[in-house]
Every structure is written in C-alpha cells, then in structure tokens.
Amino acid sequence: MTDPAPQATAPPDPARLLRSRSYVVLLVFGALIGVPVATVAYFFLEAVSKAQDYVFTTLPDELGFSSQPAWWSIPFLALSGLLVGLSIQYLPGTSGHKPAEGLKTSGAVQPIELAGIVIASFATLSLGVVLGPEAPLIAIGSGLGVLAIHLLKRDAPEMATVVLGATGSFAAISTLLGSPLVAAFLLMEAAGVGGALMGVVLVPGLLAAGVGSLIYVGLDDWTGLGTFSLAVPDIPPVGSPTGAEFLWAIVIGLLAAVVGACIRTLALRLQPIVEHRRLILTPLAGVAIGVLVFVFVEATDRSSAYVLFSGQDQLAPLIEGAAGWTVGALLLLALCKGLGYAIALSGFRGGPVFPGMFIGAVGGIALSHLPGLPMIAGAAMGIGAMTVAMLGLPLVSVLLVLVFLQGDGLALTPLVIVAVVVSYVASAHLTPLPKEAPRADGSPA
C-alpha cells in the first residue's frame, strides 16, 4: 500500500492575518523599530558625508596643497579596496551583496553580518568609490530589524523575522530616495513582492518608512546637519512634450540599454577575477578608478567629485550648471564615470542606483546639444532609461525621475515612460539568458 501524497501547506489567509492580534503587535513592533533604525541610518550617512568632506576637502588644505591634486584620490581608493577586501575575507557573511549582480533585497540579513556590512560600505562610500548608500542601508536596516526581533522574542516565527527585517529596510532608506513611497516601491519591486500577501507585508514597512521619515526630519532640525534626500530644487519649468522628444525617448532608451549592458558585462567579467585574489586586486581596482579620476581632472580641470562617489550629491549641480559643460567634457565624464562604476561593481560594496542615474543624466545632457531635445528632457529620459538598464526596475525608474525633478518630472512623465520601457525591453534582449541546469540523466533541461 502506497503512502498518501503529502498535503501541501495552505498559504496564510491575508484577511485573517490582518484581523489577528499578532498582526497588530507586528505593526507596533514595526513602528518602534523604525525609530532606532532610521536614527542609525541618519548618522551612518552623516559619518560618510563628514569623512568624504575631510578626506577630499579638509585634508589637502591641512597638508599645504592650495587645491586638491589630480592624483589625490588614488591612495585613498587603494586603501578603500584593502579595507573592503579584508572585511569580505575575514568577517562573517559577505559584507553585503555583490552589486554587480543587481540590487538584491530578498532574505533577512543576520545580525552577525552587520559588522562586515558597515565596515565595507563605509570604506567604499567615504573614500570615494563609485557606488551609492542605498544597498548598505537596506542591509543594515534588515539586520537591525532581525536583531530587534531576536532580542524581543528568540522563538519568533520565521514570517515575523522576514517582515521585521523588511520593515527595518523600509525605515533605513525612507527619505534617501526623496520619498518614503519611492523607497517602498524600490523594495517591493526589487524583492518581487506581490500577490494576496503584498499588503500584509507592505503595511508594516510603510509604517516604518513613515516613522523613519519623521525621524530624519526631526534629527535634521535637532542637529542641523542637513538632509540626505534626492531633489533638484531650482530648475525652470518645461513645456508640453513634442513629437521630436518622443523620438528622442526611443533613441535614449536604446542607447541606455547598450551602455548599461556594457557596464554590467564588464563588471561581471571582472568580479570573479577580483574575487580570486581579493586582497591584492581590490586595492588595484581602487587605483584604476583613481587613474580615471586623474585623467578626467587633468583633461577638463573639473572637480574630481564628478567621477568619484555615487553621483547623488553631484546630480543637482550638474543639471543646474549644464550650460557650462562642453560635449567633449560630458562624453569624457560619462566614459570615466562608467568605467569607474563597472570597476566598483566588481569588487566593492555599495548600491548601484545613483551612479546609473548620474551617467544617464550626463548622457541626456550631452545629447541635448543636438536639435529637438531640451536639456531637462534629455536629462530626465537619460536618468530613467539608465536606471532601468542597470536595475531592471521600471516602476522605480520612472518614480525616481518624478521625485528628483519634481514639477518638471511630472510634466515629462510620458517621455520618461517611453524611454524606460524601450530601455527595459532592449536590455532584456541584450542580457544573456541563464544556462539551464542539466537533468539527472545528463541531458539538457
């Protein structure tokens, strides 16, 4: 007699979960966790900002340089590579996810991994590597959320651990992208949250993001240190989209897909090489980025900050001062930033969002020197198209432009949508399909 087939476990009923006492407790925990997580995230970003300012602005002056030398970043980028390599090699976990493989948010981060994540990301961000803070903040928020539930209830259900880990991530990046809603959509789209349980998982995260935003604002008022949100406040309004601009949206979408594919391919090919001899090659990768900075500064006499860092703080000055850039300088900036971005993705620890936005804006501004494309429209379409080429998240790619360019972003939404969709589809065609695993008998699947 054969055993009966095992019964599949029925998924939880969202309506019953929402009415349960445990869900209310989960919401309360989510709101409470949002306070310390947002506080830690705020001061982490402030520490990164202060370190960047000291290394690249104050220290050259203290050492007697009248201005920052073009070679200045090279030793600090090498030091960053060494610190990141040591962290990955010797601390628990992987010191955060590998940015060349995209923005990953699935799975709760274990508290034991937090030290490696903080050290590697701080060394990456504060010493000028071309990556952003969003991925480390997501990981730090998740780890703190899991730590909190472990301290409160060691035998907490796995679902509670997952939800509170995600809740911590929501709180950590609640205002970094300009709005708690953009942060929520980023996490949902990156993690593939959907179905009937989406609301059950989303609501605690939204609550934590709202609490986190309040904490960011309160700490800004209290400390006077400044905010870390994304926006360009002073740009002129744009008119209605034209037919020529819609044609440009297609062109920009296709170009962004090609550029994004080149950056991803280079990063993924370099990644196993760097990992093979991490303690030697990660510092050398930093030196390579520094050489790109040197070339750009020597050729253009522009600030090294345009090639260094994530580009988040340089986006607004770039767009507001676009009239002062030549096409040659913009193309060289896109080349140096793009190569630096690919090298950084291969071995360092940080987020891929802001460098992609910056490169897209540079490309759009360069193309606006051609007929039929206003500068703001080119920058907006470039940001959206390049973001989706690097992240594969079309909804977030549109929302980021809306938040970043504010009123102009809203007026340019139809153009941005076309550029994002074209880039998204073209990127799918340019990305090789993963190889299927062979069957047990050795035949291909």
Image (cartoon, rainbow, N blue to C red):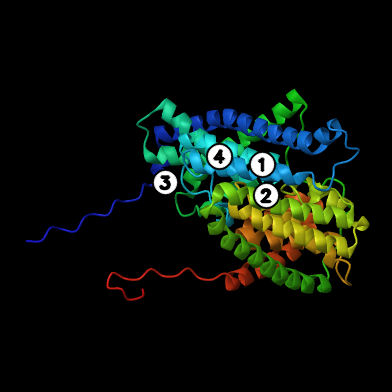
Closer to the N terminus: mark 4 or mark 1?
A: 1
Helix, strand or loop for disc 1: helix
**Labels 2, 4: front one:** 2
Mark 3 or mark 1: name the one nearer the start of the chain: 3
Spatial CA distance of label 3 from label 1 is: 50 Å
Q: Amino acid at mark 2?
A: Gly
Which one is nearer the viewer's eye here, 118 or 397?
118
- Return the residue at label 3: 14
Q: Residue furthest top?
A: 222
Which residue has dot 4 on it?
117
In which quadrant is the N terminus drawn? bottom left
Q: Compared to 244, does 273 lie above or below?
A: above
Q: Label for residue 79?
A: 1
Q: Residue at x 76, y 55 (%)?
A: 292
Q: Quadrant of residue 427?
A: bottom right
* Dot 4 amino acid type: Ile
Q: Quadrant of the C terminus?
A: bottom left
Q: Secondary structure at mark 2?
A: helix
